[in-house]
Image (cartoon, helix red, strand yellow):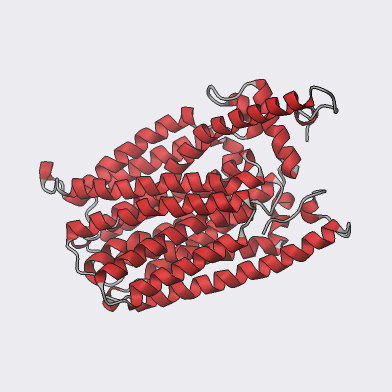
Amino acid sequence: MSSEQQSIVSHSPKRPAISESESNEDSRVIELEKKLRLKVDLRVCIIAGILCSLNLLDSGIISSASVTSMLHDLGLDHGNRYSFAILIFTVASVCFQLPATLAVRFVGPRLFFSAVTVGFGLITICTAFIHTWQEMVVMRVLLGICLSGIYPGLALLISTWYRREELQLRFAFVQSGQLIILATGGIVNFGLNQLDGRNGLKGWQWMYVVQGTITAFIGVVTYWWIVDFPEKADQSFHFLDQEETKLALARIEKDRGDSLPTSFSWAEILQHFLDLKVYGFAATFFLQNLVSTALSYFLPIILQSGMGFSENKSILLAAPPYYWAVIPVLISSRIGDKFQLRGPVITFNCFCLITGFGMLGFADQVAVRYVGTYLATGAYVSNWAALNGYQASNITGQWKRAVTAAAITSCNGLGGIAGSFIVRQQEAPRYLTAVWVSMGSHMILIGIVAVFSVYFYYANRRQAKGKSIIERTTGFRYTY
């Protein structure tokens, strides 16, 4: 840590000595923190929700397009070509996850996220004008590379701005933004499909052109909207003043002692792969994304082939479960942060998902099966925020946060690879492979959380007795 950085932290606002004015000073600090959080929420969470939705936007477009003429037009309706197109996107994303996440630190969030978002938009537009399934595969590889650093990079950025008891709700804000955009995108896709034949473009081509153009525009806006890491907040466009910057660093330093990054070295990066917690967290995201991929990419197909809805109704009916999911993700995240409950919230969501898939797979009435998609969607979306809050609350050090974010997103991608093959169209209308795999994966997830909880409990006891230091940070305790 440089002498200048040490000065920033050491001169951060501190509680004054006990005096007659202590109450007024405390009130002032509380008000400053509220103002700071609001500013960060508006400049980080909103744009993060929009940018994180790009992955879901992609799945929304291709899943909506999959019930139009696209599969036939591009030859994706033969064998497993459609599943392979989804698979190759995830493979490309996984391969570039770690270097892309580290690049966020070196290049800076403003330039990195604006560049990849514009790139994503341009590639999406180009996808409208391809003619073969091989060209679709190439476009999917390029999209995967563009998106590789968005989710882990934003998770890293968010975790550097908030205290641990604030994290899950902020991830919920991001998830809510994603969901609203995804659901609205589905309705927009329905409208764009009505333009089939206009100006020589098919309905699915209009989906790619319009939403790709909007995305490229958002990428340009991102450069001025998004902010840098806390220690470089003054480089952001019209953001914090000097006093607020010091307060932002001081509150994170007090919470977990990692407001500033240590010097970069590969030894510093690689040593974090020796921590078994990283693999445990990564495994939970693998299990989680088995389900999210199956639902986000295949829900319109399930509605069409599995429940008998028409093409347009399938596109429309895929949207409401995502609007609904905003409610449980905000409620569960508020509970998780307020009471510092991570494991119990995750476990509850897992049981809700298992119930939802049970309804989807084993009920006879279409209405009951459709309600099951609401329950399952709300549960897995809620667990995105819960799992992110869980891992971010139990690690320290900004390079370790970068490594963990890349690792969990890579395994999240591997779960997507597996998830792209568990919905087998020949198993319509029940899709029992997807049902059983989804239910089983979340039973295992419950088991992993249980093991973590036991470990965290005994580690905290040892720390309280002065027998160990957790995460190389004095006073740090696990949250479970």
Residue closest to the eye, 328 or 314: 328
Work out whether 135 lies above or below 294: above
Question: Where, by quadrant of the figure, is residue 470 drawn?
Answer: bottom right
Q: Is residue 281 left or right of residue 197?
A: right
On the rendered image, what quadrant is the C terminus found in? Answer: bottom right
Give residue 306's position: percent from left, percent from top: 25, 71
Q: Can residue 102 be seen in the rendering of this structure?
A: no
Q: Can residue 474 be seen in the rendering of this structure?
A: yes
Work out whether 429 lies above or below 34: below
Q: Residue at x 88, y 59 (%)?
A: 465
Residue closest to the eye, 278 or 15: 15
Give residue 36's position: percent from left, percent from top: 60, 30
Question: Where, by quadrant of the figure, is residue 298 drawn?
Answer: bottom left
On the rendered image, what quadrant is the N terminus found in? Answer: top right
Q: Is residue 19 left or right of residue 330?
A: right
Q: Residue at x 44, y 75 (%)?
A: 437
Numbered marks: total: 0
Give residue 3's position: percent from left, percent from top: 80, 29
